[in-house]
Amino acid sequence: MTLRVAAMPMLLVAAAASAQVAAPPPPAKVAPVAGTPILPAWTKPAIRGAWNDAKLDPDARAKALVSAMTRDEKLTMVFGYFATDFPSSLYKAPAGARAGSAGYVPPISRLGIPAQHQTDAGVGVATQGGAAVKRERTALPSNLAIAASWDVAVAHAGGAMIGDEARRSGFNVMLAGGVNLLREPRNGRNFEYGGEDPLLAGTIVAEQVRGIQSNHVVSTIKHYAFNDQETDRNAGNSLIEHSAARVSDLLAFQLAIERADPGSVMCSYNRVDGAYACENSWLLTDVLRTDWGFKGYVMSDWGATHSTAPAANAGLDQDSGFPFDTQPFFGGALRQALDSGAVTPARLDLMTHRIARAMFAQGIFEHPVSEQPIDYPAHAAVTRGAAEAGAVLLKNSGDLLPVAASAKRIVVIGGHADKGVLAGGGSSLVYPVGGNAVPGLLPTGWPGPVMYYPSAPLDEIKRHAPGATVSYADGTDVAAATALAQNADIVIVFATQWQGESFDVPMALDGAQDALIAAVGAANPKTVVVLETGSQVAMPWLGKVGAVLEAWYPGTAGGAAIANLLFGTTNPSGRLPMTFASSVDQLPDPAKPHSGDVVYKEGAAVGYKWFDAKALTPLFAFGHGLSYTRFATDGLTATAANGVLTASFTVRNTGARAGATVPQIYVAPVAGGWEAPKRLVGFSKVALAPGARQTVSVSVDPRLLATWDEAGHQWRIAGGRYTVMLADSATDIRQTVTVSVPARTMPATWRAR
């Protein structure tokens, strides 16, 4: 979901000016906004039918329910409201909505159909609305941090935790599952997504969604598709050749949808090949339905619907977030389209069926939501563990980390480390228990407020070093900070970059932090930099510091997690889910994100594939991450039997500490012919005690070896020799073998079983 606060008055005026609005209104005691649909006053008791039989499959139940519904009831299910008054003088949310939440679809009491209570987003239960009472909830680290764990168990546990909080907060739909590939490192919403590789992003996001839905909560997967920058996001036109799209962004969505079976897919704001994503029949019908077999419903992002009949006929099932669109397209306009024949009754039945099916599949009817107590201490442990698993130790010269027990003079500088840890802005923002640790930072309004979670690294550092003198400088006075750092046994600088929805950012730390770090590093080479960023940043000071820990946006227990990592209570094991470029000059398009046509010059060669194809040396490679112990990976073998490529190898912990590593399998056709020299085709997170070893086998999805044949509308694997690579990152190849792979074609409908 996305909010566009600045546009609200214009949208509300447009909605009020719409003459033919007729479908459901805010229920009782709330004056309806001009132009909103009117809900019937429910007087009949709920009636029961075959749809109440939980023994039937979701399709059978949905079919029975739709057959019992009136047209007005169907129109109710396909139209959603923003659930929060904003501004209160112009728009009043329906009385049944959860105040401060994202969306609401009213119940249909006659048939016992529950309301849809929708909440943002992928890191926890967010709060919307300027004057609404804030829900204080647990926030996971950013989605990019979860992807950096390369750990399906961590992703699933995090999803299960926020899904539990959603249910206990009274929500049965969660607008989560951001899987857009990281093509543009300056995209303001990168922190909400799963990185640059389709296999990694699809796998990790799928597990998050599976965790959420384990709570009888519908999750979306979003933003479908190619919504890869915030500049001109409401009208920008993403242009990519279809065969390249199939093996990059669309493959990430496909893998996530297959593995998680989300109840809903949220279509995005932007245009694709000239058509808005929410009325793009190639995306919504040809690919999503016909090729992938998706059975859930498509909801629009808030304000992403631009038409009635074209959107409905292209495959949009639910127009969400009235009044963010310029008019309620699935309100009275849909009624008119049905009357004129522009939309058929059969299409409305199909739209309603898909929504009902998703509700049945996730147990929404049998498991009604209500507000319940939340186990915050248990959930804090989940988010702390996720932050620890996703933090990436980028540099550690001379084993500067973990902080030595002999360090008696510790200096901490910058980043509001005395107060808390940074979070990303926009509709995904979770308000923490205890409130904003650093209130008043600009912007205080949308897409802010700038939020610091009250988990202060400084306090945690002091707890880990009770015998040391720990001093703090806020970093605003560079000379004072440098003087304080000179005689320290170790200096820890916290550096931040605030990202948020609706704007893109430079590939740099905020303000003058680069100069601060350079000065401190020059004064004391035993300087550690802890990065709290939404994506990558340039590091002109890298050669002057001893260690760098990328903590991302670490969530509501982030301070404790960072301290555990710095002092070695937890061994870092995160790996980069994106390539860190040395400068913007290495990007496919170094120019700032722009309006209008966005041509993906790199095609399917996203991230490390671009760097490989252009023989560029990154600052830090995709898959890179250090540990406080040492690992050896060897014994690689590969076979191609029964159409499946399998790689096996051994991992050993050769160091003195327990830890986890992420061996990665890349493959390349010896004869070439791909968008880049190699692709990631498998990985595994392996935790080992000192001296322990484990044999790992990875089976490769055949589509990862294929190209997309647009003319033949199929996957095509070229027969021949393939190099299989066992690697520690995209640039650190440890061992290779070759294997013969037979030629093969697979239909567009093929999926892993």
Image (cartoon, rainbow, N blue to C red):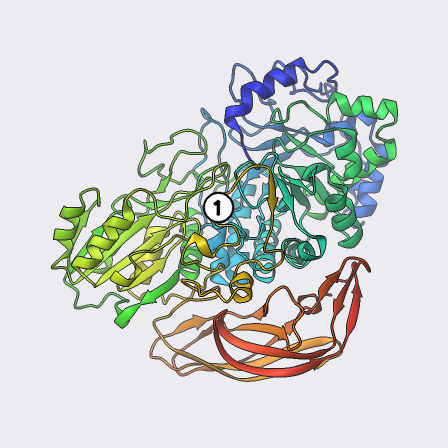
Instruction: Say whether residue 44 is visible.
Output: no
If the image is split into quadrants, where does the C terminus sit? Answer: bottom right
Q: Is residue 605 above or below residue 456?
A: below
The percent coordinates of residue 491 (x first, y second) are 21, 58
Q: Nearer the viewer, residue 53 or 329?
A: 329
Number of dots carrying numbers:
1
Residue at 70% across / 82% down in the picture? Answer: 740
Q: Is residue 440 left or right of residue 369?
A: left
Residue pointed to by mark 1? 591
Q: Looking at the rendering, which quadrant does residue 12 occupy?
A: top right
Is residue 498 visible in the rendered structure shown here?
yes
Q: Residues within 10 Å of mark 1 (few under 14, many from 20)?
A: few
Please tell me which residue is depicted at 47% across the width and 61% down the height of the picture: 149
Which quarter of the rendered picture does the N terminus lie within? top right
Amino acid residing under circle 1: Ala
Residue 546 on image: x %, y % = 26, 64
Give the image location of residue 233, x and y in percent. Answer: 57, 37
Q: Check disc 1 and report its element: helix, strand or loop.
A: loop
Residue at horizontal 49%, vertical 54%? 587
Residue 367 drawn above or below residue 6: below
